[in-house]
Image: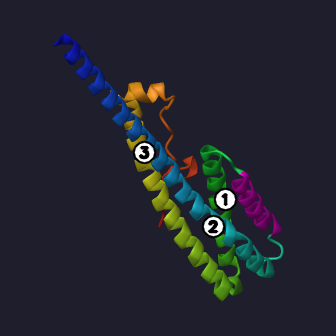
Amino acid sequence: MALWIILAIIVLLVVVYISIYNNIIKMKNRVESSFAQIDAHLKQRYDLIPNLVEIVKGYAKHEKETLTAVIEARNTALNASTIEEKDSANKSLAGALKSVFALAEAYPDLKANEGFVKLQTQLTQIEEQILQARKYYNAVIREFNNMVEVFPSSIVANMMHQSKRQYLEVDEVERKRVDIKF
């Protein structure tokens, strides 16, 4: 009888281990999938930027430094390999794009250009999609981190060499309070 009890406990532990192992793998795959969604939106953004720069070049010939900064930021973002590198590079790219849109205020003809307005609208939509994908990614990371840190799944995660992952965070510049003066 004691042998059957020991055997039942062993079988139960194996079943629990397999269940937790499978859940960790599923969460790891969700993390990778959610980052792939961000990557797809970023690719759309990267593809639009050369078109935007070409339109702006025609109107703002002496703003070469701004346009060069945008292209360099785009290339850096394209060549980033890790999640952290991509996140950092895309924060720089977002800042560079803001400076291009600020140029439109100084050039009324550019601001009225249909191609520029269309690209600006598309980039704005993509930025919204990237924001939503980042929110989803961070939610998946929270679930993954909970699984990796909570007992008993933390034991299995440790055996699988899985550890807590970093959230995609807002850049320090964007965290600062905006002062509005009348």
Q: Residues within 10 Å of mark 2 (few under 14, many from 20)?
A: many
Instruction: Give the spatial CA distance, label 1 vs label 3.
Output: 32 Å
Is residue 152 found left or right of 91 in the rendered image? left
Quadrant assignment for the N terminus: top left
Instruction: Count the labels in the image.
Output: 3
Kindly identify which residue carries mark 3.
26
Which of marks 3 and 1 precedes in the sequence? 3
Look at 52% across and 47% down and name the residue there: 168
Kindly identify which residue carries mark 1.
93
Could you say where residue 163 lies in the image, as x and y percent from the top left? 49, 31
Q: Can see residue 125?
A: yes
Is disc 2 placed on a helix, strand or loop? helix
Which of marks 1 and 2 precedes in the sequence? 2
Which residues lie in the magenta part?
64-79
Is residue 36 found left or right of 4 in the rendered image? right
Kindly identify which residue carries mark 2.
45
Q: Is residue 122 magenta?
A: no
Q: Which color scheme did the rendering employ for the protein? A: rainbow
On screen, residue 151 above or below 48: above
Assess whether mark 1 and mark 2 are in contact (beta carbons under 8 angstroms). Answer: yes
State the predominant SS element of the stretch in magenta: helix
Is disc 1 placed on a helix, strand or loop? helix
* Residue 6, quarter of the rendered image: top left
Which mark lies nearer to you, 2 or 3?
A: 3
Could you say where residue 55 lies in the image, as x and y percent from the top left? 74, 80
Residue lying at the far left of the rendered structure: 1
